[in-house]
């Protein structure tokens, strides 16, 4: 591990992170709120960043394990610094603020606030803005502003932060790839923002809801989430939640007019199929409970989008769902949407690879001499990717069980405990029977915060902080 170069890079991240506090400061000025909650953490981030950036390094090369270290420690530091506005403003204690901030940057959307409408506009902006930054990745955002490394080295950072089994360049230049991705990201967010304005939302609400949708986060500005908004606004948000669950490579292919490759995507087809089947199931099971066919379809389309893309917005009472719907929805929460999107969860690409691996191994039991490669998106998947996918699945299950064990000491029912852990680890936010997470103990909040980071960074980077994987 090259500690010096790693800390120097973390210093650059913190300098870039300090710039982000300018945005809520502008909102504070507009709404005549205090600037202190943002000036202090901005100064802390800038000072620590500049001090770390002064570290002199002779060796400038770093490898995958160094990228894991940089990404993991950077996310922990920005979560600690990013929670200070809540503490300084007197909105909550440190542990609650940390949970809220981790929930924001990991685009989970689980909240400890019982009355978000009582928060300052600038604080509401910071909560939702954290979704927007965390959706594409904090380091990815900083790298579009400040080049952290040369192109080949940047891949180690992006692989550690971007969701999915593998990260590839869209174009040879890594920074250009990031710019393309952010143009798509900002473009979709802007279109949603305009449509929400047309639907009757005010400017700030439209902006913050768009931030939450883009990052598939789920922080709202109202206590009832999106239930009070117009039907048009609900349809727009449901549509864009689905769109932000699509692999951004598909949008890039559409931009360069390679429509055949874009719509040929195997992952996209599975994503759309699972979504459609889940919507049909929810409609059939909730129509007798809701009564109105139009409202039933709207809620089914909206909530399946919300659960499946790990967003967490709501427009009605999901607690009315019968058991079969809850089981399906919980599974969709854990699987989530496509790799290369802003969603949390296991990812459909991994699900497809795992299913194909099971089918191949079953065939091999019957035909021992059979040699068969796994194909995904028309390409052969390397055995290294297959193995890492299986390891990821194993760790995913084990970590959920371990976190559930710790949270179970709070004494809540098995269903409540499972919902809390599933919704945080899968970075969803929306949960059955849990309106906010203030009911849990400080220990559970810390463990679930760790679970949110593990889910967002996809386990391996954060584990590498505590385990030194050395060969013999």
Image (cartoon, rainbow, N blue to C red):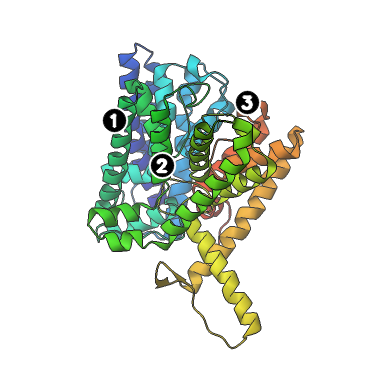
Location of mark 2 (residue): 135
Corner quadrant of residue 48: top left
Badge 3 marks a residue whose secondary structure is helix
Mark earlier in primary sequence (1, 2): 2
Location of mark 1 (residue): 194
Mark earlier in primary sequence (3, 2): 2
The answer to which of 205 and 181 lies nearer the viewer is: 205
**Number of residues whose C-alpha sits closer than 10 Å to that of mark 3, classed few (under 14), some (14–19) or many (20 or more):** some
**Number of residues whose C-alpha sits closer than 10 Å to that of mark 1, classed few (under 14), some (14–19) or many (20 or more):** some
Residue 428 x %, y %: 54, 40
Residue 304 x %, y %: 52, 42
Q: Is residue 186 above or below residue 92?
A: below
Residue 406 x %, y %: 71, 41
**Residue at left 38%, top 35%?**
236
**Residue at left 42%, top 28%?**
231
Q: Residue 180: in sight, yes or no?
A: yes
Separation of residues labelled 3 and 1 (CA atoms): 34 Å
| Residue ranking furthest to the bottom | 369
Mark earlier in primary sequence (3, 1): 1
């Amino acid at each position: 591990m090259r500690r010096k170069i790693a800390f120097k890079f973390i210093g650059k991240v913190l300098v870039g992170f300090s710039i982000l506090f300018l945005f809520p400061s502008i909102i504070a000025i507009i709404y005549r709120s205090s600037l202190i909650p943002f000036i202090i953490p901005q100064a802390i981030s800038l000072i620590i960043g500049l001090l770390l950036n002064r570290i002199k390094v002779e060796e400038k090369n770093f490898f995958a394990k160094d990228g894991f270290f940089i990404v993991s420690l950077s996310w922990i530091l920005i979560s600690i610094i990013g929670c200070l506005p809540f503490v300084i403003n007197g909105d909550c204690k440190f542990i609650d603020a940390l949970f809220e901030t981790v929930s924001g940057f990991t685009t989970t959307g689980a909240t400890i606030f019982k009355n978000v409408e009582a928060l300052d506009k600038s604080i509401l902006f910071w909560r939702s803005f954290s979704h927007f930054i965390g959706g594409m990745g904090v380091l990815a955002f900083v790298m579009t502003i400040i080049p952290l490394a040369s192109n080949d080295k940047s891949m180690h950072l992006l692989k550690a932060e971007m969701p999915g089994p593998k990260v590839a360049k869209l174009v040879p230049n890594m920074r250009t790839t990031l710019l393309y991705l952010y143009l798509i990201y900002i473009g979709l967010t802007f279109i949603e923002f305009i449509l929400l304005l047309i639907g009757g939302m005010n400017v700030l609400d439209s902006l913050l809801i768009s931030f939450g949708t883009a990052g598939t986060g789920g922080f709202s500005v109202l206590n009832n989430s999106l239930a009070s908004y117009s039907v048009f606004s609900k349809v727009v948000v449901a549509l864009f939640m689905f769109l932000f669950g699509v692999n951004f490579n598909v949008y890039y292919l559409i931009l360069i007019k390679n429509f055949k490759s874009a719509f040929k995507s195997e992952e996209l087809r599975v994503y759309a199929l699972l979504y459609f089947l889940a919507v049909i199931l929810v409609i059939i099971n909730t129509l007798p409970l809701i009564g109105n066919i139009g409202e039933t379809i709207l809620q089914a389309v909206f909530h399946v989008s919300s659960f499946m893309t790990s967003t967490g917005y709501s427009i009605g009472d999901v607690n009315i769902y019968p058991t079969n719907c809850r089981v399906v929805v919980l599974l969709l929460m854990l699987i989530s949407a496509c790799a290369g999107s802003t969603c949390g969860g296991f990812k459909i690409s991994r699900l497809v690879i795992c299913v194909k691996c099971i089918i191949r191994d079953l065939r091999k039991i019957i035909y021992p001499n059979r040699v068969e490669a796994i194909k995904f998106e028309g390409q052969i998947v390397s055995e290294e990717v297959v193995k890492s996918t299986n390891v990821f699945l194993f760790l995913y299950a084990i970590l959920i069980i371990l976190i559930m064990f710790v949270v179970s000491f709070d004494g809540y029912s098995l269903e409540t405990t499972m919902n809390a852990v599933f919704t945080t680890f899968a970075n969803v936010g929306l949960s059955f029977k849990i309106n906010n997470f203030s009911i849990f103990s400080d220990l559970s909040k810390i463990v679930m915060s760790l679970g949110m980071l593990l889910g967002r960074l996809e386990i391996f980077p954060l584990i590498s902080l505590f385990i030194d994987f050395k060969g013999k």
